[in-house]
Image (tube, grey):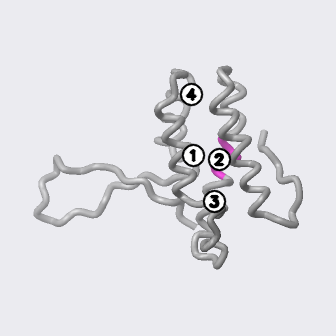
Amino acid sequence: GQITSVSSKNNSNNQWIKYVMCFETFEMETEQHLIDQVWDSVAELCTFIQNNDNSTDNKSKTHLDWTWMSAMLYRIFLSDNPILRKLGLYRFLNGNAGVQVDEPEQAVDAPKSTKSTLLQPPKK
């Protein structure tokens, strides 16, 4: 299931509550079915950040942005919990984590062996 917003009045605060709840789940839970339940919320947070990336609220120090989401993803990928690492990598590479993974554009004469992937916000 998804973690729902407490109030629609202050969406930014609700997104922070959702972020902390997701981070807590990834940090504290060890059961796959509990970890798996928060991925929809992670995707929602990524969509929220993408939609509000250029808003005037960006000037706030408490603005939820890609820096905060990357901190969560790094914590997942570097977790001591192998279930979390595997599930996180699986969700991430399948595009179910709310982050799009694309190959960077390369020059025509660039060698094929230098390809790598980059983190991109999801497309609207």
Mark positioned earlier in the residue sequence (3 or 2): 2
**Residue 71 to residue 35: above or below:** below
Q: Quadrant of the N terminus?
A: top right
Mark positioned earlier in the residue sequence (2 or 4): 2
Name the residue beneath numbered marker 2.
42
Identify residue type, mark 1: Ala
- What percent of the width, then of the height, locates residue 28? 67, 27
Mark positioned earlier in the residue sequence (3 or 4): 3
Task: Point out the stretch of residues depicted in magenta.
Answer: 39-43
Crowd rating for badge 2 (residues with CA inside 10 Å; few <14, some 14–19, many 20+): many
Crowd rating for badge 1 (residues with CA inside 10 Å; few <14, some 14–19, many 20+): many
Name the residue beneath numbered marker 1.
97
Identify residue type, mark 4: Leu
Crowd rating for badge 4 (residues with CA inside 10 Å; few <14, some 14–19, many 20+): many
Q: Which mark is residue 43?
A: none
- What percent of the width, then of the height, locates residue 21? 73, 41
- Badge 4 marks a residue whose secondary structure is helix
Q: Is 124 positioned to the left or the right of 9 in the image?
A: left
Residue 75 part of the magenta segment: no
